[in-house]
Amino acid sequence: MVVIIGAGTTVNSSVINAGITSVSFSLSPNIERLFQLGSFTPFDTNITTTESISLSNHGGGSSTVSLTPSISCTDSTATMDVTIVTAPCQGSATTINRTGTDALFITSYSYSKDFQGFGSESWSLQGKPIIVGFTGNVSFIQGFSEGNHLTGADIVSNDGIVLTGSISGANDATSQNIQVSAGSPGLGQDDIQEFGKITQIGGGIGKEDGKRGNASANVPHQLVFF
């Protein structure tokens, strides 16, 4: 294990301009051995490696990303360039550079904020699988994005998502949850939540005192081999 100093580690992103609070990178191989009768020596081996990045940042530190479902076998446009340069206590720095054609695809987004303090955003990214020996073509196409957010007088002016109805209207469905406790005084909340199609993510507000927010969006992607 190598200990990394956060104050010396840099993360650059094409979507998050400032205020990154955490980053996690994962490179996970899956080895499939094709065994055969009469031998412990595999006939062949398939190795597929998947990579993912998770990022968190303070609200007000990101720009917006438009979400458009794919209508052809071309890569999704919901991507993010990310460059990570670590600051280890010993040994040389590790650089993770996923930019340009190697940029990762955004698969989910969330925003949260309490009445006091700053809002925060979280992003999940995934790359195309790296398949040893594969000579065909792979596309990562974007599906229909859905999500939800709170609405009301005490909700922030920008929670980082643009939500619409999938056919018509402002949303597809609405839920309400009221809870209050006895006390002196007793406090509670009346949450109204909207559900629908998400057409844009990012750009959630940072500081807006007296306002709260909670929003999330799922950005499904599907691999196409051809």
Image (cartoon, rainbow, N blue to C red):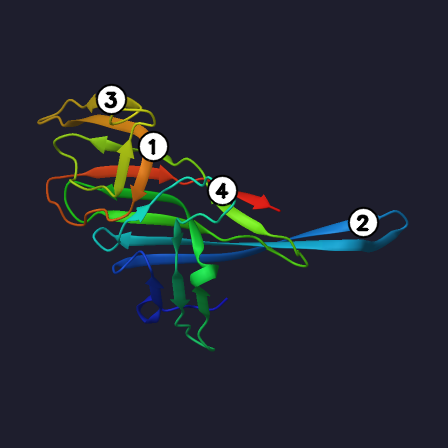
Q: Is residue 106 above or below residue 82?
A: above
Q: Are marks 1 and 2 in contact (CB under 8 Å)?
A: no
Q: Are marks 3 and 1 in contact (CB under 8 Å)?
A: no
> What's the residue type where badge 2 is placed?
Phe
> What's the residue type where badge 3 is placed?
Gln
Task: Identify the mark at residue 167; answer none if there is no mark.
Answer: none
Nearer to us of marks 3 and 4 is 4
Upstream in the sequence, badge 2 or badge 4?
2
Upstream in the sequence, badge 4 or badge 1?
4
Q: CA distance from mark 4 to mark 1?
A: 20 Å
Q: Residue at x 16, y 39 (%)?
A: 156
Task: Identify the mark at residue 197; answer none if there is no mark.
Answer: 1
| Residue 17 placement: quadrant | bottom left
Secondary structure under tag 3 reads strand
Mark 4, residue position = 72
Secondary structure under tag 2 reads strand
> What's the residue type where badge 4 is placed?
Ser
> What's the residue type where badge 1 is placed?
Lys
Upstream in the sequence, badge 3 or badge 2?
2
Q: Residue at x 35, y 38 (%)?
A: 217
Residue 187 on image: x %, y %: 14, 28
Secondary structure under tag 4 reads loop
Frontmost residue, 61 versus 6: 61
